[in-house]
Image (cartoon, rainbow, N blue to C red):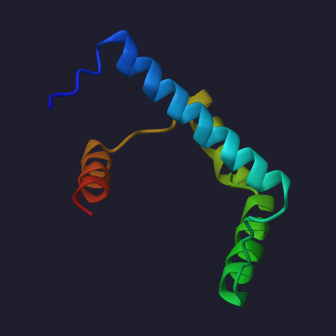
Amino acid sequence: MKIDFSSPVASQEVIDRTARQASSANSTASQGIAEDRATLSTAGQSVHSLVSQTMQTADVRQDKVSALRQQIASGEYKADPGKIAEGIIAEGGS
């Protein structure tokens, strides 16, 4: 027997079945039978703590940024194309 999912009858059966499954899942959840819960291990808690601390620290070293801005403004800053190329290759090669 070949099933044709493009027919309106087959499509309606799939919709009806999906609705019944969703209704069944909702009634089960409302009865308190199924409950999802997650618990972090001590390693997970440590990682969370470290991520929290890292997010609170500044990502920008303001002293270096200020010095570079001053060099650029005065025309003293000279970019070294060789170092730029080495950096690009090192980032892409890892």
Residue appearing at x 14%, y 32% in the figure: 1
| Residue 70 placement (x, y as % from top left) | 65, 37
Residue 63 vs residue 18: left or right?
right
**Nearer to us in this view, 78 or 56:** 56
Taking the spot 54% from the left edge, 34% from the top edge, the residue there is 18
Indicate left or right for 21 with 1 as reference. Answer: right
Relative depth, front residue between 41 and 69: 41
Residue drawn 63% across the image and 36% down it: 69
Q: As drawn, is 62 to the left or to the right of 80? A: right
Residue 8 in the image, given as x and y percentages of width and height: 38, 10
**Horizontal side, residue 84 vs residue 27: left or right:** left
Q: Residue furthest bottom?
A: 42
Outermost right residue: 31
Q: Nearer the viewer, residue 13 or 73?
A: 13
- As drawn, which residue projects farthest toward the top? 8
Q: Is residue 32 above or below residue 20?
A: below
Residue lying at the far left of the rendered structure: 1
Q: Is residue 47 above or below residue 76?
A: below
Q: Quadrant of the C terminus?
A: bottom left
Count all numbered tags in the image, as a single digit. 0
| Residue 6 coordinates in the image, percent (x, y) | 29, 14
Residue at the (42%, 39%) spot, across then down: 78
Depicted 63 relative to depicted 3: above or below: below
